Amino acid sequence: MNGDQPTLAITGSRVQLLLRRLHSLSEAEEKSPSQRFFYLKRLIRFLLFGEIWSISAEKHMQNKFAALDEQKCQFIYLLARSMGARHVIEAGSSFGVSTIYLALAVGQNVHQKKLDSATATVAGKVIATEKEPAKAAKAREYWKEAGAEVEDWIELREGDLLETLKIEEGMPAKVDLVLLDIWTPLALPTLKLVQPKLKEGSVILTDNVGMASFLYKDFLGYIRNPENGFRSLKVPFSGGLEMSVYLPQAEEP
Ligand SMILES: C[S@@+](CC[C@H](N)C(=O)[O-])C[C@H]1O[C@@H](n2cnc3c(N)ncnc32)[C@H](O)[C@@H]1O
């Protein structure tokens, strides 16, 4: 957290404290010597063998938070609020830290929409995804601890997201916001899977595109090519956060 400052996300002290605790745990893990060594090893293996990911890397990360840092989470929350995003997909949820911010935003956007349109039924949710059962269980625990303002707005799809995101039941017709915080080889296939669901003007956020640009080569080649329907740039957060807007109808004046 930013020193003792409360999070920018609008929420009560229970969720504030939970977020503080989870960010501290994740940061401590990221800064640990073993985790730093892991990232160094990944870089060396890429440089020597062109290896992008491996079974042993997968195993190593099986019980790691790898949560987005607080600044990025706050940015995502504020962006989601400003867009009024109600239909959100999160690719890679881990212990559900970023999901909490997305769920707060979605719940608050639904509430706002109800007030603005005087309609009782307004839909919205975060479709979270996680393939590690132990992580999914822990995420559910944290969301429960956060309470209804978070838990009620999440549908967690457990298993390989390249399969679970194909399930039409419960999938909104159009998606406002996608957070891609997934192992790099999955970024492009996931984007292509959700692309038919994207609303004009929807936003895709992808983590670590600066730090891991060598691993994101294909993905960035695709999303930064306007012919594929996106306008995209790297926002200079730590590690780099790609912000892409889906504008498939865009025409030059
Ligand atoms: C970087 S972490 C997500 C962190 C989370 N967004 C946060 O900020 O709290 C990426 C997660 O994606 C999960 N994952 C990897 N491959 C997956 C797949 N094929 N389907 C679903 N989840 C997957 C990993 O287990 C890991 O927990």
Image (tube, helix red, strand yellow):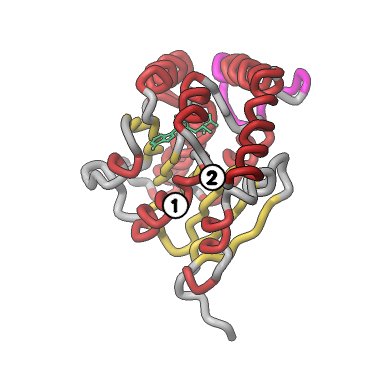
Is residue 229 visible in the rendered structure shown here?
yes
User: Residue shown at 23%/47% (left/top)?
Assistant: 168
The amino acid on which the numbered mark 2 sits, given as a three-letter code, is Ala
User: Picture quarter containing residue 107?
Assistant: top left
Q: Earlier in the sequence, mark 1 or mark 2?
A: 2
Q: CA distance from mark 1 to mark 2?
A: 9 Å
Q: Is residue 9 magenta?
A: yes
Q: What secondary structure predominates along the stretch shown in magenta?
A: loop
User: Residue shown at 66%/19% (left/top)?
Assistant: 34
In which quadrant is the C terminus drawn? bottom right
Q: Toward the viewer: 126 or 216? A: 216
Write the start and end of the magenta stretch as one range.
3-16
Confirm or deny contact between disc 1 and disc 2 (CB under 8 A). yes
The amino acid on which the numbered mark 1 sits, given as a three-letter code, is Asp
In which quadrant is the N terminus drawn? top right
Reply above or below: 154 against 6.
below
Q: Toward the viewer: 2 or 33? A: 33
- For disc 2, the marked residue is 80
User: Residue shown at 78%/21% (left/top)?
Assistant: 3
User: Residue shown at 54%/45% (left/top)?
Assistant: 80
